[in-house]
Structure formats: structure tokens, C-alpha cells
């Protein structure tokens, strides 16, 4: 089924949209979620939450590339899940409790954080466009898709050592770029 | 800045950048491509080798280019099916122009392809509507394969017989050569079948090659009853007889080429 047909199913509020999405992208999304969580159960939950998020966002949003749209949802949800899990492990810590209490002093974090993340994301995009295709793809595979160094090196036909070196140089260049752009790093 | 912020920000990088990287990571890995290519090469080589071996075992000499046969058989490769319905004599016999697919004349649908695609001819038993289809085994021994096939019994000629109406399906007819016959032939080619003298009878003629030598032999007194087939060795036939007895006196050359 074509992506636009799947999106149409979401817009017509057909529940088969979920099945169609799962059939076409289930494995792909599960892999992304697993890269983040390293846990089968959390991965499945993340993917299911992705479908719910997609259901809630379409309509009104009509993604131009469904695959990328879903990958972003899964990635964000899986990262949130890892953070939640880490926080639970620290529960009981007075430091964690104080953080939640002090949160009220600094107002709602969501809007500002989201804005910052968007601006930072735009800056990273601009930076990546200046890099070589290998450096760009290596950075995205490693830090967006969270693929292992080994897998990424294999995909890019380079040794792991070379990939690590490339990533190191790219990170250093990104730091420099962000500093120049006025971000606090 | 915490690394988490970078991770959050990566969710906002441009879609086209993600797509490009996604294509790279979704493509088959180079090592897998190499393995696939290697496997394809090996498979191709095996197929080529198998085809070569099969061809070497099944190809028969073009008898129309053989000087001895050329002398008596028409060179025409235009071989209309010999359907000459001979109700009077009670048989309808002739060569098929091509045994490939083994459905001569399209008389009977669903006739299975014989295991070895060789020259074939059919024989219709009157007054029944039974057609018997005959084809020979691949009796060809290139010199280099003589040793491997030396075990094959060449004191007879084995003919496969297919009776579409019989539950027995394909059977074999063994055409025994006389004891004093030179049984070292390395190639046998069915030439034709003609109507026999009696009802339901036919005669089969084969061309046997012994290196530089060759001979035509005939079998007749075909008998068929209850899916039992039988022929008797008739004798050596001259080339002139072969020529004159070609079915319908037309260019019903014996073509055994696959």
C-alpha cells in the first residue's frame, strides 16, 4: 500500500490505518525503538504508542514522508520511555524529588525546551549540510537512528576505527559551529 | 548543554537528511551484496555445467549430415506429421515431427512430457481410439563417456511406450537384437514406423551407428494387448528400402534431433 493511501486511511479515521502502518513499517519502527531502549517490551510499547500518536496527529497533520514522520515519533517516544525508566530507578532520591518541586519555580519547561530543540535542530541541519555525505550519514545513522558503530561502519563501507574518527571530528566541528551560532555548549 | 538536548534537537532535523541516511542504512550491506553475487556466480556456473553435461548426454548426431544416411534419406527437415489414417489396415502410424512436449498433432491434451525428449512416433490402434507414443532412450555414447556408460545393455533397443488410456502410463518395449548381432553400437536413432501387414501392426526402423559403421534394423510384428507391447526383430534393412518405405513416400525423414 502506498504511503498516501495509508495517510488517507488516517484521515478517514479508518482503524485499518494502524494495521497498514504496522504491516509496512512495524519492523522498521521496532528496530529504531530497540536501538533506543535495548528492550523488547519497551520497543513494542514505543511502537504501539507511535501508532496512537500518529492516529492523534493525522488529521490535521499530513506528513510529506510517512516513514520519516513515524521514525521521529518512535524515536521521541522511545527516548521518553528510557528517561522515564531512568527516573523511576532513581525514585526516592531527594535530589529527584527536589527537582520536581523546583520545576514549579521555573515555569513550564515544555514550550521553551521545544523551541530550543527546534532551533538547535535547524542549526544541526544547517551544519550537516556542510559536511561530506559520509560524515552526514554517519552522524545521522549513529545519533538519530542510534545504530551501533559496527552496523554503521558496515553500511558506510569503512572500518570501525575510521568511523569513530570521523564521528569524533564531526562532533568537534558541530561544537565549534554551535558556539559560533550562539548556542551555549 | 546536556547531550539529551542534542538528542531532542535531532528530532527536528530536516526530513531529507534523515531520508538520505535512511536509504544508506536500509540498503543491503556490501558484504551481503558480495555474498549474493558470489552465490549467483556459483549457481550460474553449476547450471552451465549441468546444461553442458545434459547436452553431451542427449545430443545425437545429425543423421541428415551423415553421408551414409544422406544417401538414402531426404535432407528435408520439413517433417509434416504422418497422420495417414489407414483405417483399412487398422492402424495409423507415423513419426512426429518433434517430440518436444510430446503432444504430437495435438491429439491428446495433457500428455506428459517424456523424461527424455527424443524422436517419437505414434501408433493408433484401430478400432479403438488408443494412441501409443514411442520414443527412445538417449542411446548415445561419445567416446569419452563410453566407460561411464559401458554398463548399458546394448543387446536390445529400449523404447518407451506411452498409452494415454492405460493406467500404467509409460512403459518400455525392449526390442531384442539377435544373439549374433554386433551389440557395440554407440548410437541408435529411430527412423520411422510404418503400418504393419496386419491389423494394428506396425514396423519400426532404427539406425544404429558403430563409429564409422552404421546399419538400419527393423522390428515388426507389433503386438499390443492389455497394455503389453511387443515387437520382433525383423532384420537389417537396406538404405534403399528405408528410402522407399518412408511413410507416405514423402520426406518423412527420420529426425532424431532434439
Image: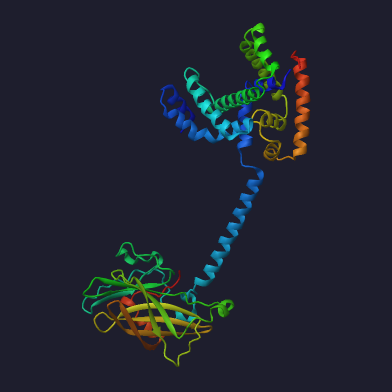
Asked whether the viewer can see residue B72, the reply is no
Q: Nearer the viewer, residue A122 or A142?
A: A142
For the image, the number of numbered tags is: 0
Q: Nearer the viewer, residue A71 or A48?
A: A48
Residue nearest the viewer, comparing A9 with B84? A9
Q: Quadrant of residue A130?
A: top right
Q: Is residue B37 left or right of residue A47?
A: right
Instruction: Indicate the colouring scheme.
Output: rainbow
**Image position of A175 (left or right of B60):** right
Q: Would you say B3 lies left or right of B216 here?
A: right
Q: Quadrant of residue B157?
A: bottom left
Residue B128 shows in the view: yes
Residue B65 appears at what percent x and percent y? 49, 75
* Res A85 quadrant in image: top right
Q: Position of residue B167 (x, y in %)?
A: 30, 70
Give the percent coordinates (x, y) of residue B209.
Answer: 49, 82
Q: Is residue A141 above or below residue B35?
A: above
Task: Identify the residue at horizontal 26%, vertical 72% (top origin).
Answer: B130
Residue B101 against residue B94 in the figure, above or below: above
Tell me which residue sits at (41%, 23%) in the image: A13
Q: Position of residue B116 (x, y in %)?
A: 44, 69
Residues A78 and B229: in front is: A78
Q: Look at 76% across and 26% down and name the residue there.
A: A171
Image position of A137 (left or right of B110):
right
Quarter of the picture containing the C terminus of chain A is top right
Q: Is residue B69 above or below residue A184?
A: below
Amino acid at each position: 500500500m502506498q504511503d498516501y493511501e495509508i495517510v488517507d486511511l488516517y484521515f478517514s479515521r479508518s482503524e485499518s490505518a494502524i494495521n497498514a502502518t504496522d504491516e509496512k513499517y512495524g519492523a522498521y519502527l521496532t528496530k529504531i525503538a530497540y536501538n533506543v531502549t535495548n528492550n523488547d517490551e519497551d520497543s513494542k510499547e514505543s511502537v504501539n504508542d507511535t501508532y496512537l500518536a500518529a492516529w492523534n496527529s493525522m488529521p490535521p497533520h499530513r506528513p510529506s514522508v510517512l516513514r520519516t514522520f513515524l521514525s521521529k515519533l518512535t524515536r521521541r517516544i522511545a527516548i521518553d520511555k528510557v528517561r522515564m525508566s531512568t527516573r523511576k530507578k532513581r525514585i526516592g532520591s531527594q535530589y529527584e524529588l527536589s527537582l520536581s518541586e523546583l520545576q514549579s519555580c521555573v515555569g513550564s519547561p515544555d514550550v521553551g525546551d521545544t523551541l530550543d530543540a527546534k532551533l538547535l535542530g535547524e542549526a544541526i541541519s544547517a551544519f550537516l549540510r556542510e559536511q561530506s555525505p559520509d560524515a552526514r550519514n554517519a552522524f545521522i545513522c549513529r545519533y538519530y537512528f542510534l545504530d551501533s558503530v559496527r552496523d554503521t561502519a558496515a553500511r558506510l563501507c569503512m572500518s570501525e576505527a575510521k568511523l569513530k574518527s570521523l564521528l569524533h571530528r564531526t562532533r568537534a566541528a558541530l561544537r565549534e559551529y554551535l558556539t559560533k551560532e550562539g548556542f551555549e555548549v | 548543554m546536556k547531550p539529551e538536548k542534542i538528542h531532542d534537537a535531532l528530532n527536528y532535523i530536516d526530513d531529507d537528511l534523515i531520508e538520505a541516511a535512511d536509504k544508506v542504512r536500509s540498503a543491503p550491506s556490501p558484504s551481503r551484496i558480495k555474498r549474493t553475487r558470489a552465490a549467483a556466480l556459483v549457481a550460474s556456473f553449476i547450471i552451465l555445467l549441468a546444461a553442458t553435461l545434459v547436452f553431451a548426454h542427449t545430443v545425437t548426431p545429425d543423421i541428415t549430415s551423415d553421408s551414409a544416411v544422406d544417401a538414402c534419406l531426404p535432407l528435408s527437415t520439413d517433417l509434416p506429421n504422418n497422420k495417414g489414417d489407414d483405417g483399412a489396415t487398422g492402424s495409423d502410424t507415423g513419426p512426429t515431427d518433434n517430440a518436444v512436449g510430446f503432444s504430437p498433432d495435438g491429439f491428446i491434451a495433457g500428455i506428459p512430457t517424456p523424461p527424455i525428449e527424443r524422436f517419437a512416433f505414434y501408433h493408433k490402434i484401430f478400432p479403438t481410439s488408443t494412441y501409443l507414443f514411442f520414443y527412445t532412450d538417449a542411446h548415445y555414447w561419445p567416446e569419452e563417456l563410453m566407460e561411464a556408460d559401458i554398463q548399458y545393455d546394448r543387446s536390445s533397443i529400449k523404447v518407451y511406450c506411452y498409452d494415454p488410456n492405460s493406467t500404467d502410463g509409460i512403459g518400455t518395449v525392449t526390442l531384442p537384437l539377435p544373439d549374433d548381432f554386433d551389440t557395440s553400437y554407440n548410437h541408435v536413432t529411430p527412423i520411422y514406423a510404418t503400418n504393419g501387414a496386419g491389423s494394428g501392426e506396425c514396423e519400426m526402423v532404427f539406425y544404429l551407428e558403430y563409429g564409422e559403421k552404421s546399419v538400419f534394423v527393423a522390428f515388426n510384428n507389433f503386438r499390443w494387448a492389455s497394455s503389453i507391447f511387443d515387437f520382433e526383430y525383423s532384420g537389417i534393412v537396406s538404405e534403399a528400402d528405408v528410402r522407399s518405405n518412408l511413410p507416405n513416400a514423402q520426406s518423412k525423414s527420420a529426425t532424431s534431433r532434439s
